[in-house]
């Protein structure tokens, strides 16, 4: 029979305890490292997701409309812009019923009286209209040049008065210095002193002094 001394038994027990302790410590360290790596990964993902959001300029409605206005000086080049829908009154029976009440149709038919604005280099009729309606808080909806066959922006509605809102021949047209250009509004480059009029027609241009021409 083999006899194990107290010293040998104590030694074996201590070795076993040290082995278990070291293994536990190792497992704890590995677990902590995994947790750290997971946390770092999550933080990195969150930062990546936040990056596009941080680049977006989020504006309130008031901020959107509060454009900085340029004071007109003697050195500035300027143009004038007006918006009118007076033809609607002669075709009231054709007008969309939803537009007959409220402030959609001004009593005098003038959405915007003749307004002088600063002309910026390369401005088109569309550029000026967009800037002014935004500043004056006038609703406007348009179809971009990339979304139609004309290669130019198309004004669908102003002040909630849309194409076909007053009959199947109705819609918005513009003229510059009294003439209706045969070019889209985002392709017409303005010059100093130009007078732009946006007018609503109920008869394909005949009731405003011009007829619509296919481009």
Image (spheres, helix red, strand yellow):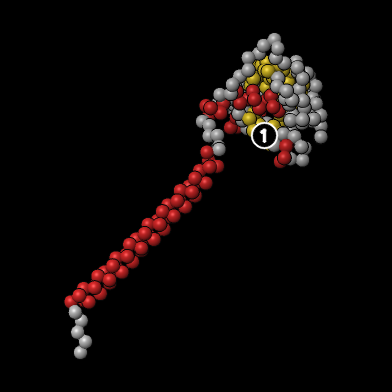
Left or right side of 86 for 25: left
Q: Is residue 173 above or below residue 113?
A: below
The quadrant the N terminus occupies is bottom left
Classify residue 196 by image quadrant.
top right
Q: In this orientation, which residue lies closer to the viewer: 24 or 36? A: 24
Residue drawn at the location 72% of the way across and 17% of the way down: 79
Q: Residue 205: tell me if it is visible.
A: no
Classify residue 78 by image quadrant.
top right
Residue reaching furthest to the bottom: 1
- The image position of residue 151, as x and y in percent, is 76, 37
- The image position of residue 88, as x and y in percent, is 67, 25
Q: Is residue 34 above or below residue 163?
A: below
- The image position of residue 200, as x and y in percent, is 70, 26
- The image position of residue 58, as x and y in percent, is 53, 34
Q: In this orientation, which residue lies closer to the viewer: 19 or 136? A: 19
Left or right side of 156 for 8: left
Left or right side of 205 for 17: left
Residue drawn at the location 55% of the way across and 42% of the way down: 52
Q: In this orientation, which residue lies closer to the viewer: 161 or 112? A: 112
Q: In this orientation, which residue lies closer to the viewer: 195 or 164? A: 195
Instruction: Give the SS element for disc 1.
Output: strand
Residue drawn at the location 56% of the way across and 28% of the way down: 64
Q: Residue 37: tell me if it is visible.
A: yes
The residue under label 1 is: 142
């Amino acid at each position: 029979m083999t006899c194990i001394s107290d010293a040998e038994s104590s030694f074996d027990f201590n070795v076993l305890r040290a082995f278990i302790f070291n293994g536990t410590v190792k497992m704890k360290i590995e677990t902590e490292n995994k947790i750290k790596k997971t946390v770092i990964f999550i933080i990195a993902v969150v930062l990546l997701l936040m990056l596009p959001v941080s680049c977006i300029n989020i504006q309130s409605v008031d901020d959107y409309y509060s454009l900085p206005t340029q004071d007109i000086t003697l050195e500035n080049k300027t143009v004038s812009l007006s918006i009118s829908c007076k033809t609607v009154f002669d075709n009231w029976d054709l007008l969309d019923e939803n537009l007959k009440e409220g402030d959609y149709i001004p009593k005098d038919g003038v959405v915007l009286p003749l307004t002088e604005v600063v002309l910026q280099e390369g401005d088109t009729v569309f550029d000026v209209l967009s800037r002014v309606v935004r500043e004056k808080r006038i609703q406007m909806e348009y179809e971009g040049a990339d979304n139609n066959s004309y290669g130019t922006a198309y004004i669908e509605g102003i002040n909630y008065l849309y194409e076909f809102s007053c009959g199947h021949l109705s819609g918005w047209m513009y003229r510059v210095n009294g003439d209706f250009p045969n070019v889209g509004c985002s392709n017409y480059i303005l010059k100093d002193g130009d007078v732009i009029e946006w007018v609503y027609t109920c008869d394909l241009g005949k009731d405003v002094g011009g007829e619509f021409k296919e481009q």
